[in-house]
Image: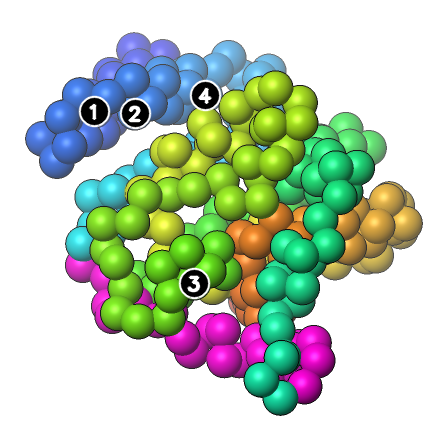
Amino acid sequence: MSPARRALWGAAGAAAYLGAGAALGGWRPDPALLAAAGLAAWLAPRRWRPLALFAAPLLMVAAAYDAQRYWVGLRGAVHVAQPRAWELAWFGIGSGASRVTPAGFLQAHAAPWIDVLAGAAYLSYLAAFLGAAAWWRFGRRLAAAQDLMWQLLWINLAGYATYMAYPAAPPWYADRYGLGPAVLSAAPEAAGGARFDALLGVHAFRDFYAKNTNIFGAIPSLHVGQTFLLVIFAWRARSLRSAASAYFACVVFASVYLNHHYLVDGVVGSAYAAGVVLAMEAWRRRVPAGGAG
């Protein structure tokens, strides 16, 4: 494709994306930034195209996350009590009427130093994922690291689809609004992350969750699922095993400690990660040598 033709197709794609967003939800700066980044990746000089391809799945994840606002009203009935019942049955602490979820137990045993460590782990999950993927990419594992980035896209798309088919309330919502019919107008909250913000005098959790257009997207936990992708890759690549495993444990703990997820959510997220890896491997076996991908 000639440079002029490539530029024309890129500009047309960016304009179509921005036009669709404006028609559905009005003008916002986030889609404009995504369109600019996508166009830059598309027009990257030949020597930079491998890096642009490496970043492409991340841009698609960002676009899909932002686009949830357009179809969130089409989701199914919200499940509030069922996820909590599963958590109590499988991971509950105590017995009888005093049985509580791990998230509930940890809210009663919070400590400032844990708030800081858990908050840092939870906020850094995407940066950690990209840092590890870049480590492998520049460590002569280009093809495998590129697959990891595509796995990032597929687990997020699978997660967003599940949020529509099985909307589930997070533990903080159940604590605040109870287990009755879902309050669809409930605003997103930083939950336990507010303690992190208050301790450090920042608005990291508040600003991040203020952009959340679907608070009933608890199952699966994509924080846990994406981090488990790293663990799977690390053990296969025989590098960063200890670091990836330790970080995964921190993210699982933080997701519960900060009251954003039940352990059940993390189990499902990890299963999604394993499923995505197996599906990509099956697809790779079907693609002839030298074929697409």
Three-letter code for the amino acid on which mark 3 is drawn: Ala
Of tags 2 and 3, the one toward the viewer is: 3
Residue 162 shows up from this direction: no
| Residue in the image at 55% along x and 36% along y | 194
Rounded to the nearest angstrom, the CA distance separating label 4 from label 3 is 42 Å
Whether residues under marks 1 and 2 lie with C-beta atoms below 8 angstroms apart, the answer is yes
- The residue that mark 4 highlights is 41
Give the residues in magenta: 74-95
- The residue that mark 1 highlights is 18
Whether residues under marks 3 and 1 lie with C-beta atoms below 8 angstroms apart, the answer is no
The disc, 3 or 1, on the residue closer to the chain's N-terminal end is 1
Vertical position of residue 132 compared to residue 174: above or below: above
Of tags 4 and 1, the one toward the viewer is: 1
Rounded to the nearest angstrom, the CA distance separating label 3 from label 1 is 37 Å
Residue 83: x and y in percent read 47, 73
Three-letter code for the amino acid on which mark 2 is drawn: Pro
Say which of 13 and 135 sits in front: 135
Three-letter code for the amino acid on which mark 1 is drawn: Leu
- The residue that mark 3 highlights is 174
Residue 292: x and y in percent read 50, 49
Say which of 224 and 168 sits in front: 168
Rounded to the nearest angstrom, the CA distance separating label 4 from label 1 is 16 Å
| 98 lies left or right of 174 | right
Of tags 3 and 1, the one toward the viewer is: 3
Residue 158, quarter of picture: bottom left
The disc, 4 or 3, on the residue closer to the chain's N-terminal end is 4
Rounded to the nearest angstrom, the CA distance separating label 2 from label 3 is 32 Å
| Residue in the image at 15% along x and 32% along y | 25
The disc, 2 or 3, on the residue closer to the chain's N-terminal end is 2
| SS type, badge 1 | helix
- The residue that mark 2 highlights is 31
The quadrant the N terminus occupies is top left
